[in-house]
Amino acid sequence: MKNTKKKNAPSMRKRITNLLVHLALAILAFIWLLPIIWIVLTSFRAEKGSYVNSFFPKSYTLNNYIKLFTDRTVLNFPRMFTNTLIIAIFACLISTFFVVSVAYSLSRMRFKMRKPYMNMAMILGLFPGFMSMIAQYYLLKTMGLTEGGMIRIALIIAYSACAGMGFQIAKGYLDTIPKSIDEAAIMDGATQWQVFTRIIMPLSKPIIIYTTLTSFIAPWVDFIFANVLCGANSKQFTVAIGLWNMLQKEYIHQWYTAFAAGAVVISIPIAIIFLLMQKYYVEGVSGAVKG
Amino acid sequence: MKDKNISVINAIKFGDIWTKLSMLVMGSGLFMHKQKIKGVLVFLCEIAFIFYMATLGIGRLALFGTLGTHEQQEVWNEAKGVYEYVQGDNSQLILLYCIVTMFVIAALIVLWILQLRHSYKLEKQLEEGKKVPTFIEDIKNLFNGNLHITLMALPILGILVFNVVPLTYMISMAFTTYSKEGNHLVLFDWDGLTQFIKVLSLKGSIGKQFSSVLKWTIIWAIFATFLNYILGMILALVINRKETKGKAFWRFCFILSIAVPQFVSLMIMRTMLQPQGAINVVLQNAGLIAEPLPFWTNATWAKITIIIINLWIGIPYTMLQVTGILQNIPAELYEAAKMDGAGPVTIFFKITLPYMLFVTTPYLIASFVGNINNFNVIYLLSGGGPTYVGDSAGQTDLLVTWLYKLTINQQYYNIGAVIGILTFAILSVITLVTYRNSKSYKNEEAFM
C-alpha cells in the first residue's frame, strides 16, 4: 500500500499543477478574447449608443451591418471602402516591387554602397515617423496632390514611396536561400536578371506574398497619415478615419454599434490574412535575429 | 572603378584635354571617348540644371538667408476703390524650395564627379587598347552585373524625395521661429539654437514639460519592452510544456488578438474603459465599486492602464516570435539543471532568460526603439491625457505624441522639430551603443 501511495503522490501533484496551468491558460485566453467577444456582440446589438448597462445586448439585430453599407448620408462607409481598396491595391504593388528589389540587391549582390545603404536605412528609421510626415504633407501640397481626388495619389505615394527602407524581413528570408543556386546558374551563363526573375523570385514566393499582404493591409489600419492628408475632405476618407470619426462626440451615439459592425467587417479579412501569414512573419523575424 | 588610380583628382591632374573639358562641359569626355549617347545624356542633364538654376534656383537660394521679408499687405487700389491684398513671402515654401534646390545641386555634383571619373577611366582603357563598352552593352549590364542599380534606383529615389528631403526640411525648422508664438506662421526667420535652449534649459514651462515627458517615455519604453518580453516568453514556455494539452488551440486564442487590427482593438479598449464604459458598468452593477474607476482621468491610473493594455497587445507578439527560438535552447542545459534539483523558476532565470537575452538582443533593441516611437497605443488610448491646464503635453504623452500635438494641433513647428531631433539623438545613442556590439551585426560583417 505504502509503495503505491508513494508512486501516486508525485503524479497527483503533477496532475494538480497541470490542472492549474490549464485553468490559468483558460482565464488568460478569456481575458485576451474578451474585447473581441465584446465587439462582436456590440455589432449585433439593437440598442443604440455607446453606454449600456449590461455586458450582453438585450436584443439582437443585423441592422448595424445594413446601416453601415446603406447609410450614405453622413459617414459614407461604402465609399470609404472603395477609396481604401484602390489605395491599398496600388500601394501594395509599388511597395512589394520596391521591397523585393532592394532585398534581392542587398542579399544577393555585393556592391560598394551596400553597407552604407543598410546603415542609412537604420539611421533614418530612428527618426520619429511624423517628423518626415509633416514635411511630406507640404511637399505633396506643393505638388498639388492634397486637393480632391488627388489625395488618393498622395496617399498611395505616402504608403509606398519609402518602402525601400523596410527590406529587413524579406532580406532575412532571401539570405536563407543557398547562394550556390545562383552561382550554378551564373556558371551556366544566366544573367543576374534571369537569376532574379526565374530562380529567386519563384523560390521566394512566400516572402513575396507576405510583403504584398502586409503592404495591402497598411492603408486599412493606418489612421494618422490618412488623417493628416485628408483633413476635412470627407469624400476621400479611408476606412480607418471613418471608423475613428464614428467614435467622435458628434457621431458616437448614432454610430457606435455601426462602428462595431465596421470593425468586425474590416477585422475578419485582416485576421484571416494574418493567421495564414504568421509563419512567414515568424520566419522573417527569426531570420533577422539570426542575421 | 575599382582601380585606385581612377579618381577625380587624377582625372583633373592627368586627364587629357577632353577629360579636363568635362569639368566645364559635362559629358564631353564621355562623348569623345566613344560613349556618345551617354555623353549627350550627361550634357543634357547639365543644360537642364543650368536652366533650372537660371530660372528658379538662384532666385530661390537668394532668399535662404532671410527666408522672405515681405508681409502680406493691403494696398489701396485707387482705380477700383478697394483694398487689394498683395501676396507676401511664404517662408515655409521658401525654405522647402531652398532645400529642394540644394538637393538638386548635390545631385549635379555627384553626377559631375561620376562623369569625370568615368571619362578618365575610358581614356585609360582606350590608351591600353581595350574595347570600350557600347551603349547597348551598358544597358545590358544594367540587367546583369549592375542589376542592383536598376533595382534600387526607384526605391532610393522614393526614399530621397519622401524621406530624406522632408526630414532635412523638418530638421531645419528647429532653427527657425516658425511657430504660433509671436505670429510667425507665414513669415519666419532663422533663430539659431534658441528653441533648443528653451527645451533643454528645464526651467521654463516647455523645459519642465520636456523633462516630464522624457521621464515617462523612458519608463514606458522599459516597462513595455521588458514586461512584454518576459511575460510573453513565460506564456510561450507554459504553452510549450510537454504536459499542456491543446497547444494549437491556446496559441490560436492569443494570436487572434493580434490578428485584429491594432487601431480597432485599441479604440474598443478605450471605449470599454470610459467612466460609463462596459467595464465600469459591469463592476458597478455587480456592486464591487461605487464610483467609476478613473482609467483615463487620473494620470497614474492612465499610465498603469496603458502599460497593462500594452501587455494585452504585446504578449502574443512575443509569444509568436520567441516560440521557435525557445526550442533551440540545448536540452542538455535543462537536463543538467534538473539533475541539480533546480525548480522551474530557477531554470527560467538561470538558463532560459540569459540564453534568450543573448540571442535576441537585436530584437529587444528594435522593440525598445519601436516603443519609444509607439504612437498608436498612446494616441488611440489616452490621447496623451489627462492634460493639466496650460500644458501642451499630457501626462501620458510620449515624445512622439507630444511632437504630433505640437505640430499638427498647436502649430509650434520649431519646438516640435526640436523634440523630434532630440528623440532621434536619444535613440541613436541607445542603438549605436548596443547594436554595433551585438552578435548579429558582427555576423553580418562576417557573412560578407
Image: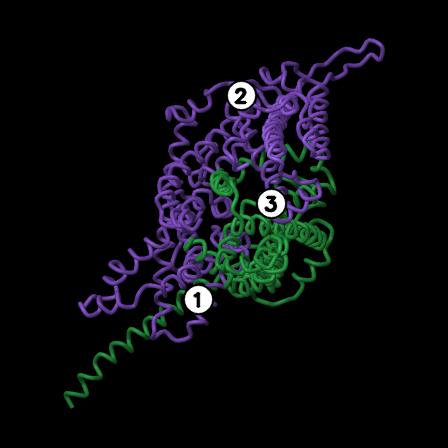
Q: What residue does disc 2 label?
A: B177
Alpha carbon of mark 3 to alpha carbon of mark 1: how far? 55 Å
Q: Earlier in the sequence, mark 2 or mark 3?
A: 3
The residues tagged by marks 2 and 1 sit, at their Cα atoms, a distance apart of: 53 Å
The label number, if any, that marks residue B146 in the structure image: 3
Which residue extends farthest bottom? Answer: A1
Q: Colour of chain B?
A: purple
* Count of numbered tags: 3
Q: Is residue B293 left or right of residue B276?
A: left
Residue A83 position in % (x across, y down): 70, 50
Q: Nearer the viewer, mark 3 or mark 1?
A: 3
Q: Is residue B16 visible?
A: yes
Q: Residue furthest top?
A: B78
Residue found at the far right of this picture: B79
Q: Which chain is green?
A: A
The amino acid type, in three-letter code, at marker 1 is Phe
Q: Chain of mark 3?
A: B
Q: Are marks 3 and 1 on the same chain?
A: no
The correct choice, above or below, for B345 with respect to B308 in the image is below
